[in-house]
């Protein structure tokens, strides 16, 4: 109940902030580059290990140099942190190591896209227009460092949808990938996401039949000014409730979204289980195939 | 390597560029071998099939351009596995008998996880094992899996749901 209340409060707060600032309803998302992300302060606070620092990021905000965080093994005894390449990532690694007292449980890899950037990109898809063209949600795959955009299978061959997808792929490149899902299977996919991808991934969905978009726009016309005064109070209440919530709540500035967040647990994901048990490619087989193709050359 | 790059390599291979084959082989050898081993539950057979596949790909590539080389190669692997299992019948499959000797460097937890998963997979049909391996080992999308299995997207997803349900039940102790 507390989480639901905090989500509602924050949602309402974020919805009303743009309107209260300008007095005008805002019906389209802000451009990707204009969303400000505040760097969390790592020092002087120290954390007992990477798990504690991870929880801190979950409760506050991830640094821009972090691309993703996931479990290394089936028991989730250690975590891998994906970092941006170059000096930014190196500085981030140094900051992380300075903030945690024990570093044996963390490994680092280089990835291309900041987690914050992927989430900022995801916000572009939550518009009435993108919903009309088939966008139904997204999955953030931290280990793959990609955002999977879920498109309604029924609109797969629609020319407008194709153009939109081509535009997304052209603009965001390897940061995104496309998956087609049948409308009736969206709920199943949510159910499966925990099993398949573990607790380190999450998935947000638009609610296809929800009328929040229309309601929100009409509401702005009438109560935008009033909410200018109510917003700071709502934000403070939401922050207090979120602080005490064990779950991270993902909030978007545009309504009609069902958010699902998972706490970090030691549950093994099926995907991890497959990856950790995959057989190695035998050297002798490699030699056999190379010899066979060499013979075929002759 | 993304699909576009693989498609370019495939086109070069079809045009007779031998260097392109080497790159395709490096990209695809591991996922193909894993999917084959998961499907046939037999290490030796999976190795033979992997060798057959790449030798065929080298000596007799498709005569015309293929829209998705990744799907094409996995489909070839699936067909080889199905043919091999048909010939192999009625020998019962038991993955635990086929499991290699434990590597001393393996962690016990990982070894147990591997044995559990192999046992559970061995209770599924070969088609289900292929599907789950394509999804989890090869990280393929349902769209591509549908192409490989030669069915529609919803059909692929339904089969996947059935397979994962059976696997979860087995792993949770429902079918030992």
Image: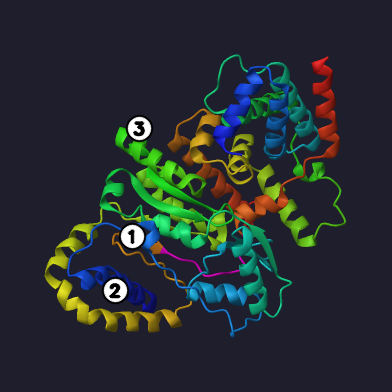
Upstream in sequence: badge 1 or badge 3: 3
Residue found 62% across the figure and 83% down from its top: A46
Whether labels 3 and 2 belong to a single chain: the reply is yes
Distance between the alpha carbons at the discs numbered 1 and 3:
25 Å
- Measured as percent of width and height from the top left, residue B116 is found at 71, 53
Give the labeled residue for mark 1. A257
Discs 3, 2 touching: Cβ within 8 Å: no
The 10 Å Cα crowd at callout 1, few under 14, some 14 to 19, many 20 or more, is many
The 10 Å Cα crowd at callout 2, few under 14, some 14 to 19, many 20 or more, is many
Quick one: SS at disc 2? helix
Residue found 38% across the figure and 55% down from its top: A205
Q: Nearer the viewer, residue A77 or B92?
A: A77
Q: Is residue A15 left or right of residue A62?
A: left
Quadrant position of the C terminus of chain A in the picture? top right
- Measured as percent of width and height from the top left, residue A275 is found at 67, 51
- Measured as percent of width and height from the top left, residue A237 is found at 33, 83
Residue A13, which numbered label? 2
Discs 1, 3 touching: Cβ within 8 Å: no
The residue range painted magenta reads A260-268
């Amino acid at each position: 109940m507390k989480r639901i209340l905090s989500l509602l409060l924050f949602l309402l707060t974020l919805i009303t902030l743009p309107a209260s600032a300008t007095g005008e309803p805002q019906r389209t998302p802000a451009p990707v580059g204009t969303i400000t992300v505040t760097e969390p302060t790592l020092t002087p606070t120290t954390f007992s290990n990477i798990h504690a620092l991870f929880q801190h990021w979950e409760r506050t905000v991830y640094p821009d140099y972090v691309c993703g965080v996931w479990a290394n093994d089936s028991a989730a005894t250690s975590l891998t942190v994906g970092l941006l390449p170059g000096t930014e990532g190196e500085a981030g690694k140094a900051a992380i190591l300075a903030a945690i007292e024990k570093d044996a449980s963390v490994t680092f890899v280089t990835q291309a896209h900041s987690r914050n950037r992927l989430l900022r990109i995801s916000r572009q898809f939550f518009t009435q227009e993108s919903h009309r063209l088939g966008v139904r949600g997204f999955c953030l795959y931290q280990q793959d460092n990609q955002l999977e955009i879920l498109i309604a299978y029924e609109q797969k061959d629609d020319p407008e949808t194709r153009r939109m997808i081509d535009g997304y792929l052209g603009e965001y490149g390897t940061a995104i990938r496309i998956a087609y899902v049948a409308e009736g299977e969206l709920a199943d996919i949510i159910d499966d996401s925990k099993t398949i991808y573990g607790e380190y991934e999450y998935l947000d969905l638009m609610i296809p039949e929800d009328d929040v978009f229309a309601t929100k726009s009409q509401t702005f016309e009438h109560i935008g000014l009033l909410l200018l005064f109510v917003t700071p109070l709502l934000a403070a209440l939401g922050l207090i409730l979120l602080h005490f919530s064990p779950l991270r709540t993902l909030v978007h500035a545009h309504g009609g979204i069902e958010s699902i967040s998972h706490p970090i647990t030691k549950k093994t994901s099926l995907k991890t289980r497959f990856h950790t048990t995959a057989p190695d490619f035998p050297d002798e087989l490699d030699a056999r195939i190379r010899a066979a193709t060499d013979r075929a050359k002759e | 390597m993304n699909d576009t790059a693989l498609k370019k390599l495939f086109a070069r291979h079809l045009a007779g560029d031998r260097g392109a084959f080497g790159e395709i082989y490096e990209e695809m050898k591991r996922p193909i071998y894993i999917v084959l081993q998961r499907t046939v539950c037999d290490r030796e057979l999976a190795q033979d099939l992997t060798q057959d596949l790449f030798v065929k790909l080298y000596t007799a590539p498709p005569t015309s351009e293929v829209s998705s080389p990744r799907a094409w190669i996995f489909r070839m692997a699936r067909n080889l596995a199905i043919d091999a299992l048909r010939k192999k019948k009625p020998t019962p499959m038991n993955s635990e008998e086929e499991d290699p000797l434990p590597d001393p460097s393996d962690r016990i937890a990982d070894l147990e996880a591997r044995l559990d998963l192999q046992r559970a997979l061995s209770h599924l049909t070969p088609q289900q094992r292929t599907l789950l391996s394509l999804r989890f080992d090869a990280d393929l999308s349902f769209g591509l899996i549908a192409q490989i299995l030669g069915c529609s997207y919803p059909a692929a997803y339904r089969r996947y749901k059935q397979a994962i349900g059976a696997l979860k039940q087995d792993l949770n102790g429902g079918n030992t």
